[in-house]
Image (cartoon, rainbow, N blue to C red):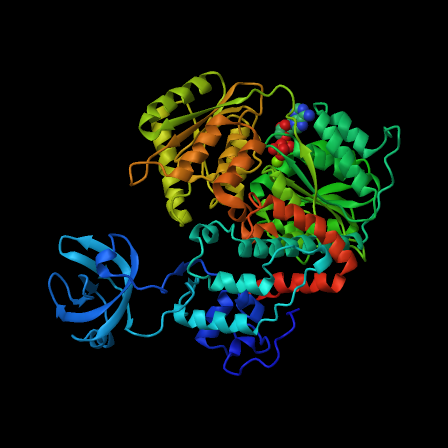
């Protein structure tokens, strides 16, 4: 709910009017403000500038240097429109110390009038000092002599249809109207002279003597105060979510018997696995089992590097549920991945389930209606004890008999809404337990803050017999060496992945590009080597046929776009070539690399890179490639990724499900985070109303209106 309104907002300020249906009857300015999430007075107050302009001083023209942002005042001595080399307005001003030329390529007649010879003007812009003397391109021009402001001028990030001066005015009045009473109780609060109003006022309108660096790096006490408030809001809301969840009820599994029951599906599945579990798999399996036996719905993230064996852990958890007479669902982000899970789990489980009159169901969007109806019926009757598929699993039409456990593979690929929909597949009043799996480990600081509402299990051990993957960076002009490597691998009976990047936004162009690469490779490698192509645009049946041929080694080289990024499992593949590796994200590269090194053969990953137009690989790209070459450890990769990208981007606003921090930085504001984490439970317990007000103030209705 919106925070309390200020008493009687001025009528002119429509932004404070009661929220009407999104978009209806709004002026262009209002719509633009909403796009920025600016609805309530407090939203304006918390909309902090991205930078400042110093209009508090006037300098002598003679004292300005090349590159300075400067404000000068002088008399216009010349003003004319010239047409060569192109139409432009040229004016000269003189302040007695020196002269400065003003140049406009696009200008209004009013500007020309303002710069009439003899007028005294105040001019602000970036000074360039060429041979022809000083010059400012497109300066802002005002009449001289008006009072100088005594604070820096804020510059806000804006959108089309919302001019900076208008936005400034809106923010100023929103801030003035905001009720900024303290929500942090004094006796447990943040100590310091900067209260909320003082801090916000200062950050919008800092005094000119401020050390600019402390505003830029957010170390100024006013910034500390704001960041502390924000972190507290985030901690409070997560704690609240956790408490709410604790009030829900999930199906309860009976405790695992001390002696395994040989007749159980769980034991039988263990017996048919062609390998024993790693220590990590056993430990994590126990953590999950413990959760399943509690009546609070599980909310657990299973993180483990690519190849660490998450699927088996999931299957065993499913078996426990089925043993207790419940259903399970396993959802994957792509059809290929879902099909792989299905193929593997059906092989292991179907015979065991059949003996119990049960089965595994398969649900995807591309399925024929008849088949889907049949599967849906099996799900509804409960005969399908395990349901595997894509988003189709959570489609409204699918009704479960008694869903106890929902498993989401590659959870970061799913949006919050989809995760919620899966949880909503409750039976009666019971919420299913939720197990999310991800190969992109969440760095510890993030786990503690964003995912405070999540329990985390980690597979920190790879199955035995894997050999480390050797990673090589090779410049694109040395492609020939890569061809030699491919020949060598195939001569040993091994197989190769070749990944083409997404170059264009258009899939059609990518497809053409991948197709050309396939043809080229087929020609270069020659008979009898078979080169296949996999692309997300291909019909499902065709994709599956190609995957099957690759799995059977009828195809030796598989060219693909990033379709294979997640989950694909062909242990005989021992070489991964990634073209234009500089264009991929770090976790994506690591995931791709994880497609090899799954068997006992020594495996390698070749990152082909090509410098861009500048002749160099960009700095961030270089850092990513370096990280890949230096480490194969998924956790270290995640840490570096966080370092390169920062937590906001790392999570991705849409994916995280948690409101992103606008001001605080989890990587550096660790002391403030500790403070907020300690305070949140105390505040929620002792001052619940203040806690609620604090959450509303900071997180409020923003998300809702961003969509409008
Ligand atoms: P990921 O964690 O990347 O999803 P998978 O579950 O696909 O990993 O497992 C990778 C491969 O390792 C699969 O072929 C799987 O059958 C195999 N595997 C899983 N656990 C073990 C184990 N304990 N010992 C040997 N191989 C295992
Ligand atoms: Mg997997």
The quadrant where residue 441 appears: top right
- The answer to which of 588 and 188 lies nearer the viewer is 188
Q: x, y percentage for residue 303?
A: 65, 37
Q: Where is 222 relative to 613, above or below?
A: below
Residue visible at 73% across and 33% down in the picture:
284
Q: Residue furthest right?
A: 258
Quarter, ligand 2 = top right
Q: x, y percentage for residue 431?
A: 77, 53
Position of 697 with respect to 84 (left or right) is right
- The answer to which of 376 and 211 lies nearer the viewer is 211
The quadrant where residue 144 appears: bottom left
- The answer to which of 156 and 251 lies nearer the viewer is 156
Position of 598 with respect to 271 (left or right) is left
Of the 4 image quadrants, the one containing the N terminus is bottom right
Report whether residue 662 is seen. Answer: no
- The answer to which of 655 and 5 lies nearer the viewer is 5
Q: Residue furthest bottom?
A: 11
């Amino acid at each position: 709910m919106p925070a309390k309104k200020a008493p009687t907002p001025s009528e002119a300020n429509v932004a404070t009017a009661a929220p009407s249906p999104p978009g209806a009857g709004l002026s262009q300015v209002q719509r633009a403000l909403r796009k920025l999430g600016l609805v309530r007075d407090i939203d304006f107050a918390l909309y902090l500038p991205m930078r400042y302009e110093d209009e508090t001083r006037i300098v002598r023209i003679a004292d300005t240097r090349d590159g300075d942002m400067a404000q000068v005042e002088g008399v216009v001595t010349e003003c004319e429109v010239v047409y060569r080399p192109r139409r432009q307005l040229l004016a000269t001003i003189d302040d007695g110390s020196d002269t400065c030329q003003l140049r406009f390529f696009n200008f209004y007649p009013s500007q020309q009038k303002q710069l009439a010879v003899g007028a005294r003007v105040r001019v602000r812009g970036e000074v360039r000092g060429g041979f022809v003397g000083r010059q400012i391109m497109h300066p802002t021009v005002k009449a001289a002599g008006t009072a100088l402001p005594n604070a820096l001028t804020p510059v806000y990030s804006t959108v089309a249809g919302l001019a900076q001066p208008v936005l400034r005015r809106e923010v100023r009045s929103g801030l003035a109207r905001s009720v900024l009473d303290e929500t942090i109780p004094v006796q447990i609060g943040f100590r310091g002279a900067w209260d909320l109003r003082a801090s916000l006022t200062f950050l919008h309108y800092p005094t000119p003597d401020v050390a600019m660096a402390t505003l830029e790096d957010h170390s100024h006490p006013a910034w500390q105060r704001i960041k502390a408030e924000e972190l507290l809001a985030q901690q409070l809301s997560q704690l609240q979510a956790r408490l709410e969840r604790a009030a829900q009820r999930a199906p309860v599994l009976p405790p695992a018997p001390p002696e395994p029951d040989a007749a159980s599906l769980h034991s039988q599945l263990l017996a048919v696995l062609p390998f024993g579990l790693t220590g990590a798999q056993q430990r994590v399996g126990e953590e999950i089992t413990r959760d399943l036996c509690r009546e609070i719905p599980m909310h657990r993230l299973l993180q483990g590097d690519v190849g660490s064996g998450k699927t088996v852990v999931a299957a065993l958890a499913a078996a426990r549920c089925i043993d207790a007479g419940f259903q399970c669902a396993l959802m994957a982000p792509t059809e290929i991945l879902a099909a792989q899970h299905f193929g593997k789990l059906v092989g292991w489980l179907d015979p065991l389930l059949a003996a119990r009159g049960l089965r595994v169901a398969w649900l995807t969007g591309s399925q024929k209606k008849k088949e889907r109806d049949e599967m849906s019926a099996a799900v509804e009757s409960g005969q399908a004890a395990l349901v595997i598929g894509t988003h189709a699993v959570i489609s409204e039409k699918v009704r479960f008999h008694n869903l106890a456990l929902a498993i989401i593979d590659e959870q970061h690929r799913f949006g919050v809404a989809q995760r919620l929909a899966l949880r909503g597949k409750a039976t009666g009043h019971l919420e299913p337990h939720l197990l999310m799996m991800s190969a992109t480990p969440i760095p510890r600081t993030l786990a503690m803050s964003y995912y405070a509402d999540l329990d985390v299990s980690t597979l920190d051990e790879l199955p035995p017999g894997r050999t480390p993957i050797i990673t090589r960076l090779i410049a694109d002009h040395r492609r020939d060496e890569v061809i030699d490597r491919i020949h060598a691998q195939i001569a040993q009976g091994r197989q190769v992945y070749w990944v083409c990047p997404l170059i264009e936004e258009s899939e059609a162009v990518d497809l053409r590009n991948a197709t050309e690469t396939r043809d080229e490779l087929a020609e270069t490698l020659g008979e009898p080597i078979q080169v296949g192509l996999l692309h997300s645009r291909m019909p499902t049946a065709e994709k599956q046929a190609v995957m099957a041929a690759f799995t059977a080694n009828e195809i030796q080289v598989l060219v693909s776009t990033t379709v294979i990024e997640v989950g694909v499992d062909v242990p005989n593949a021992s070489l991964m070539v990634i073209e234009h590796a500089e264009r991929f994200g770090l976790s994506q590269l690591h995931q791709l690399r994880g497609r090899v090194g799954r068997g006992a053969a020594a495996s390698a990953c070749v990152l082909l890179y090509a410098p861009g137009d500048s002749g160099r690989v960009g700095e961030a790209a270089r850092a990513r490639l370096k990280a890949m070459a230096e480490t194969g450890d998924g956790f270290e990769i995640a840490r570096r990724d966080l370092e390169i990208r920062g937590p906001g981007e790392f999570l991705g606003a849409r994916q995280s499900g948690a409101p992103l921090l606008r001001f605080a930085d989890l990587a550096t504001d660790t002391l403030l985070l500790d403070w907020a984490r300690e305070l949140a439970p105390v505040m929620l317990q002792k001052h619940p109303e203040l806690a609620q007000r604090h959450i509303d103030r900071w997180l409020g209705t923003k998300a809702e209106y961003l969509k409008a």
